[in-house]
Image: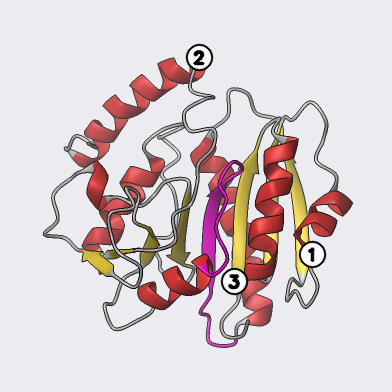
Amino acid sequence: MEGIPRIAVVATHNRPAELRRLLRAVGPQCHAIVVIDNASSRAVPGWEVHAEASAPSCTLRVTEVIRDDEQPPNLSRLWNVGLDWARKQAEEWSPDGLYDVAVLNDDAIPPPGWWDAVSGAMRGPLGAVAGSSDPFDQLNPGEMRLWDRTAPMSAATRLAGWAFLLRGEWEGARFDERLRWWYGDDEISLRAREAGGLVHVGGFPVPNTGANASTVGVLAEQAGRDRAMFVAITGRQPW
């Protein structure tokens, strides 16, 4: 793997087995990983993150674990903590300021070649600033589809919120912390469509094995407040 720096941001809470599986999947595809450990009962060990993510002939340069104990969590803020870390790494590694950031749920499993495919589409001639696999797996392998400012608000025109890429150098690569649990990925999808577009690629489905499993109790209540906040911020319904 060559080219611009690739940095993965992962927020996690009490999912050690899922996190290990993700690290083994994404480690061979990137140069750096930061794990935001949000109040896990067993703190995520830094040595374990590096050991799980490393592989023979791996280009991984550095891993980091940042502990954050806020409960209930502000997921947008946790992602921004990871983006801040990624930016500092890129300042050291990227003389032209270009770098990819992947934002990954701890229960996602990006298949081999996923980063190559999504980054290639995002940084290709379409001019996108963000990208992901097709969230509904409707595109054929090798197909891609750009969604720009003309696209309607829809679940079909948003990033796959559990595994997506951003151009690190894009000024809009930041999450709105008023959206604490849900819809942060919808809000950045909206801005990406307006800033040049987001691209979907076919042939690299990313399983999201625990989808919505954590959105219960206070987090389900927060999701409802986040929907109202999304409408207040954007003037639109998310989907």
Task: Specify the amino acid type for callout 3.
Answer: Arg
Kindly indicate whether the residue at mark 2 contacts the one at mark 1 (C-beta within 8 angstroms): no
Task: Specify the amino acid type for callout 2.
Answer: Val
Which class describes the residues within 10 Å of circle 1: few (<14), some (14-19), or many (20+)? many
Query: For the C terminus, which image quadrant?
Result: top left
Give the residues in magenta.
95-113
Q: Which of the two discs, 1 and 3, sits closer to the camera?
A: 1
Q: Earlier in the sequence, mark 1 or mark 2?
A: 1
Helix or strand or loop: what does disc 2 sit on? Answer: helix
Give the alpha-carbon distance from disc 1 to disc 3, as whole Å.
15 Å
Q: Earlier in the sequence, mark 1 or mark 3?
A: 3
- Seen in the picture, residue 79 relative to 202 is either above or below; the reply is above
Which class describes the residues within 10 Å of circle 2: few (<14), some (14-19), or many (20+)? few
What residue do we see at 53% from left, 75% from top? 99
What residue do we see at 68% from left, 78% from top? 92
Residue highlighted by disc 1:
54
- Seen in the picture, residue 82 relative to 182 is either above or below; the reply is below
Q: For residue 218, which numbered disc appears in the image?
A: 2
Residue highlighted by disc 3:
6
Task: Give residue 48's position: percent from left, percent from top.
Answer: 85, 50
What residue do we see at 35% from left, 81% from top? 124
